[in-house]
Every structure is written in C-alpha cells, then in structure tokens.
Amino acid sequence: MFFSGNPENKRLQEHHSMQTNWKKWGPYLSERGWGTVREDYSDTGNAWGYFPHAHAMSRVYRWNEDGLLGFSDRDQYLCFSLALWNGADPILKERIFGLAGGEGNHGEDVKEYYYYLDSTPTHSYVKMLYKYPQVAFPYEKLVQENRQRTPHEPEYELVDTGVFNDNRYFDVFVEYAKDKPDDILMRMEVFNRGDKTALLHMLPTAWFRNTWIWGYEGGPMGDVLGKPKMHLEASNTNVIHVNHPSLGKYWIYFEGDAEVLFTENETNTQQLYGVANNASFVKDAFHNYIIKGDSKAINPQNEGTKAAIHFKQQIEGGAAAVWRVRISAKELKDPFHRFDALVSQKQKEADIFYADLHKDLHNPDMRLIQRQAFAGLLCSKQLYYYDIGQWLKGDKGSTPSPLRKHIRNGDWEHLVNFDIISMPDKWEYPWYASWDLSFHTIPLALIDADFAKRQLTLMTREWYMHPNGQLPAYEWNFSDVNPPVHAWAAWRVYKIDAKLAGKGDRNFIQGIFNKLLLNFTWWVNRKDAEGKNVFQGGFLGLDNISIFDRSQPFPLGGHIDQSDGTAWMGFYSLVMMKIALELAIDNPVWQDTATKFFEHFLRIAGAMINMGGEDDGLWDEEDGFFYDILQIPAKHARIPIRVRSLVGLMPLLAVETLEDELLHDMPVFARRMGWFMRKWPNLAESMACIYHTGQSKRHLMSIVTRDKLIRILHYMLDEEEFLSPYGIRSLSKYHQKNPFMLDIEETHYCINYQPGESDTYLFGGNSNWRGPVWFPINFLIIEALQKYHHYYGDDLKVEFPTHSGNFISLGQVADELSDRLIKLFQLNENNERPFFGNQPLFQHDPYWKDYLFFNEFFHGDTGQGLGASHQTGWTGLVAKLIQQRA
C-alpha cells in the first residue's frame, strides 16, 4: 500500500519497483546474540551456558552480531552501535543485559530500559532511547536476587535496585536519518537527568561481522576474500575509511575532538580459555584500554576490523550533549553541512507519513500509542542467519559432537536462513517464530504491505518450509507445532492491501496458497492420529494452558483429543476455502479446491460435536463448553479435562460468512456443497447451517450453532470468568477458587487461575497462559465476533457483561473488547497507563511516562505488562485495533 503525496511513499515505491534499495540499511542488529541456539555448540544443548553474557564482550559470534541502539546493512557486513561507560561500570556497555533462562525466577528476562520511539518503513528516520544509570550497573545484584526468588515472587527489576534514584541517569537518544540509501546520519543526544555533573564516555562503534575465521577461503558466505580492513586515513581528518570486498568503500565522518581506537573483531582466547590469541588485537580491546588502562590493547597502526570514536565529556546536571557521525558510500567535502537540518527534515517526513495514517485519528495519546507500536514493529527487524546443515556439521577444522544431530533440529538440514525477518523481540526472542510472525504482518500491512507479504512468503520457501510441508516453528525446536495461522495472516494481509491499494495482489495470494496446500496436508497426515478429524498437535502455542505439557508423552500411553488443536484446523479449513473461492473468481477450477476445504471443515465440525455417533465429542452439553479429552486406550478411559480456558473458546474462531451473490457466481462449489450436506445430514446438523441466510442474505459456516454460541459467550463475557477489564483472560477466574485436579497412577495434576507470571517452570516459566490477557487470541476473538455479527446482526444480542442486564450486539461486543485492549496503554482518569502497573516512576515521571513497552502478555486483573517487555510483534496488533476503532 502506498499513500500519496509524501516522500516516504516515494521511497517505498522506489524500493518496491527495485529502483533504489532504501532498505539496504536499517536497525537489523539483534539486541542479543549470546545465549542463542545458533551459537550453541555444546554437547548438551545448553545454549545459555555455552555462550553466556560474560563471553559476549570477548568472543566472536558465528552467525550474527548484536549491539546497543544499532544499525547495519542487510547482510550485516558492517555494523554500527554505541558503547558507553559511566566511569563506574565493570564493563563497557555495548549490549543489552538480561538474565539467562536458568537465572530468572520466571525464566529469561531483559533487565534494561530501552525504547523504539519512531521509524519509517524504509528506516529513512529512526529514533531510539536507552536509559543509562550513572552509578555502577548492578549486574551481580540482579542475577543473585532473581536467582534466589521463587516462581511465586515478583521479578527483581533494574528500577528496584535504586540506580535511577534522584534521576542519576542519562537519557541516550540516537537518531538515524538517510539522506540517500547509502548516506546515513547518526545523531546522538544525551541528557543528564540528574542535578550533578556526570562523566560519560561515548563510543560510536563500527565493525565487520567476522566472516573470515571459519576455515573458508571466501568466508562462510563465499564472497569475502581474505581479511577485510578498516583503516584511518589520517589522524587529524575526523574520518575512518572503510573498505569491504562485498560492501565496497565507505567513509565514516565524525565531528569534534575524539580519539579513534582500532582493534580486530577476533576472540580473546587468552582471556576466555587461557590459550594464546590468534590475533594481536582482539574484540574486547576497547574495554581493556578504557576501563583497565591497557594502552597496548589497541592497534597503534590505526587499522583493524573494529573501530570506535571515543568521546569523553562531563555533562552538567540538567544539560545535554550532542555528537554527530555520518556514514557515506561517497566521499563528502563538508559532511556536517546542514546535518541537523537533514535529520529534522527526515523526522518531518516521518510525521507526514504517519499523518496520512492518522487522518481519522484525532486523539493525540492514541496517535502516540500507535506510532510507538509501529516503531517497535519496524525496529524489531533483524538479520537472521542460520544454516542448519553447516551448524550440524561444524565449520572446517572443527569436530562437533556427534550428539548435536540428536539434540535439536537434526531433521532440518535443508533450512538456510539469511534474511531480514520480523522478530517477536530482539532480546527475549531474537529468533523468528512462524506463528508470531503471522500476527506481526497484520499491523505491518497498514504501513508496508510489501514487507508483510514478503515475510509470509518467506516462511513457505523451500529453504524454510520442510519438504514434508511443515512450517519451521522456532530455533529451539523447528519441529514444534505452532497454531496454523499462516493462511489467515496471508488472507488478512491480502485483504488489507487490496483495500488500501485498490486491488488485490493475486500473484501473492495464489503463490502462497499453493505452498499452504502442502502445509495443510502435513497437518492432516501427521496430527490426526486416529483419522477421526480430531487433532492432537502437541505444543500448539498456548504453552502451559493445560494440566499436561502437551508436547511430551501423556500418562499411561494416552493422548489428548484437543479442542483447540481441532478448532484451529477448522479455522484453517475455512480460510483455505475462502482463498480458493477468491481465486475462483478468475479461474473456476479453484471451486473444486474450495469444495475440498468445505468438506474438511464440515467433518471437523461434526467431529468436535460428536465424532463417531457415540458420546465422544469435545462439546459438553451439560456445561455448555468445549473441553480437551484425555484418551487412555490401555484402560479404555476417556477423561474430560474440565478446565475453562482458551482451549474451549477456540471453536469460536472457526467461522466464516459467504455472500449470497458469491454462491450464485460459484455454481460448481454451491452444487457440490449441497450434495455433500445431503449425503451427510448428520454433519450438516452439527454446524450453523449454511442454508439459513442471515443479514444481507449472508450465509454462515461455524462450528458453533446459535445456541452453543450464546452458551459459550455466557462464560466468556462474565467478569468472574473470562472477561477482564483489559480483554479476555486465557483461563477463567472461576478456577481461582475452583482449581481443576486430576490424579492418575499416583500422580497429582492441578491447574488454577494465575493472572500474572507463571508459578511453574513448564516451558521455562517465562510465559503464562493460565489467566493473563494475550493480544493474539483476543484479536482473533474480536474478528470472529465481527463475523458472527455480519450474519446475525442486531437480531442476536448478548448480555455484556454477563449478569449486568445490558444486552448489546456481537459487533458492539467486539468494539468493547477492542477498547479494553487499547485501554492497557491509554492514559486513564488518574493519568496512568495500566500496563505500567504500580510503578510510580513509569506512571508519573515526565521522562518515563510516555515511553511505552509492548509486553508479551498482561495481568488478567490489573493489566500490568508481563513477560518480554518488547514483544511489539503480536502486541503491536494494538495499532490495527486503534485504526479500526478510528
């Protein structure tokens, strides 16, 4: 989609038509490269222990780089970021710190405050903020205190340590602005928020990703011949000359008095392992030079593969300092002429771009929320490099453990990733997750539909998708099963793009549909164990929502017939049917395929209600709810898991409406659909019948009939059950006083309402689906309610909230839920934002209160943001909700 009349629109058009590569440079550096699966070459698969944070300053990465408020080219040959030192820290601040998976009382957890404040889709303008304490950063205190806390206690956060008391910190703002695709202006402005003068060492740093030490003549990518050099032309010209055999020549200009430091991006093996270094100068040289005073650590020849511009300044209390750097592919005579004016111009162009989007959005606070949500999405892009075949074999000259193939991902040797990908979170989750990515693309489609489409298509490429049709889950185990939302995301992006651009991208939707046919077949063949159209699926994305770890073997050799897994497949079938009918507008042959998916849906709907004509469905008529069923064949046992959770709400998602005129235009589909329903009347009776037209002569296909819908909504809209002030809870509050318990063979299982962080270590303990509010499922529920309203209209009204006596339409319910989710971020009557919780610094301090986090999930009662603090990916859906409500 392209808005008219603004410069960013022109850049998007030029990039889309491949005239100019405006996205060559961007915020593609990860916030964390250590502790990742890619860097784990251990015998045990302990990624956090094999490459810990303590190694990151001294050890070269194999697969990617990380940095603080960074920027890089899309191949990450040349990287830029900041290093800082306040004169008190034990190490240079070069990257974001957090707790490893085994250190936090709720799993891995970032322990810093940084914000993505603004970005255009081409990254022609980007603004970020890092809050840097002026006292020693409490690394050990954070680790020790969190390690000794139990899962029942809150996390110990950086603000709890007192390092921000009396405003003794720096606000470090970094702006990147592109005058041309290869001309990047970097403006750093630092405010001393305290009242006393404080020292700051500021080191804008440039380095090459190490592509030369892995035993290949041309580097792992095959195109870096020899060892590239970065060298200073002259000590008094304020310029660093960059020469890279693939990237070419660049000039890095800086303003003001500074000392330029050089070293090599090579591992300090002497420091880490007591083994002599291969290079005379190593990665942690700037730390050793500045903090330890080792003058021999840096290269006196002023050349290397890593360089830093070392500024040092005393900043008075309440004052600010500004530094300017420019990176250009052309030699410039006066690089700082109109520098600030150019940065200001790019910021104004960003304002123009978002003003188009905000033309119907008049509330300034809502504009702020949406723009920061978009900034988080755009700044969470990252170069993701992972060649599993090479990772399993090891690099030349290395002998990896024979156990590697059996630890993880041994059957994904075909997978080769080297792309800019939207990450869930560049610290907590610096790896893509295919189902997260699907949700990311929905708000992204509003501002850069081309990128959204490319992300979805990428996951279906033959070097991503498994030959058997499975989509890769995430690097910890690509074979894990995520909910099948890819087709839904493709359809929604297609429709959003068509609405904004005036026509749909048929090449995109047909191309991805062909690949999704393979994925759907994989699901049917692999996850319907008994061929009854009831699915097991395993993980299915909802982590600890069950009393069992659903990705592990079940008690007594049993298995679970999953309400959510089966409903997801009904949902998948309907979306595929809808896409096939769209394609059939141009080519009637697709009507056959649409019929096939209609039949799949009908059989799944029938199975959920009553699988084989006996009392073995997933619907509980007495309770009026869907449940998982534990099947134990050895004991001929069938045990309903009577937990009211999202598992039982998922069948609501399997709903679609068809316009009457569409059926008239699709005679083959309509005829075969009619034959199938006459042939199998028992299946037709199990769903909302397509023959009964509703509003505007629409037809409805849904797993739930009107009666079942009303009964489920009775629970879902009850404030003592699912309905939170901030959306739909993942587990009913009913289980706070009524936990579900099950005893099998002397093993006791229990699940209860936990509205905040998880109090178990199931799935690592860093996410919780036993009570909190989660954006992605809420978003899908809202869409489902809108579809039901399209069919029933005002003829169907439900009590909202339950027991209130207030009856509204399902469309109004969808609006109410949208408003509750948006309210998480909005200033309320107390001028507070609920997601900040009860932290007064965040709520009221003028230097904190308007900088937003987009958390992984939210407390089911208070709305406090929990889990990963920057999971803008799917929580960025708030941007789409705001746009819809506007």
Image (cartoon, rainbow, N blue to C red):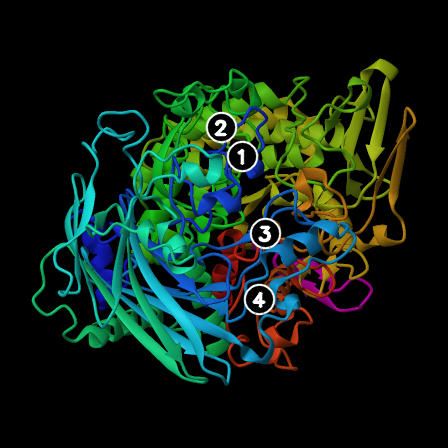
Callout 4 crowding tier (Cα within 10 Å): few <14, some 14–19, many ≥20: many
Which residue is labeled 1 in the image? 50
Distance CA(mark 3)–CA(mark 4): 26 Å
Which mark is on residue 41?
A: 2
Q: Marks 4 and 1, how far apart in space? A: 41 Å
Residue sticking out furthest to the left? 333
541 vs 240, left or right, is right
What amino acid is found at the position of numbered circle 4 in the picture?
Ile
Residue at image point 39% right, 33% down = 276
Q: Which residue is mark 3?
A: 791
Task: Compare residues 497 and 436 and report the one nearer the observer.
Answer: 436
Label 1 sits on a secondary structure element that is helix
Q: Is residue 866 among what the camera can see? A: no
Q: Which residues are magenta?
A: 787-809
Can you identify the residue that label 4 sits on? 822
Q: Nearer the viewer, mark 4 or mark 2?
A: 2
Q: Earlier in the sequence, mark 4 or mark 2?
A: 2
Instruction: Give how far across and how far down residue 210 sits, in percent.
Output: 31, 38
Residue 331: quarter of image: bottom left
Q: Is residue 374 above or below residue 611?
A: below
| In magenta stretch: residue 797 | yes
Residue 587 in the magenta stretch? The answer is no
**Local crowd size for mark 2, using a 10 Å CA cut-off: few (<14), some (14–19), many (≥20):** some
Q: In the image, is 433 to the left or to the right of 356?
A: right
Give residue 597's mark: none
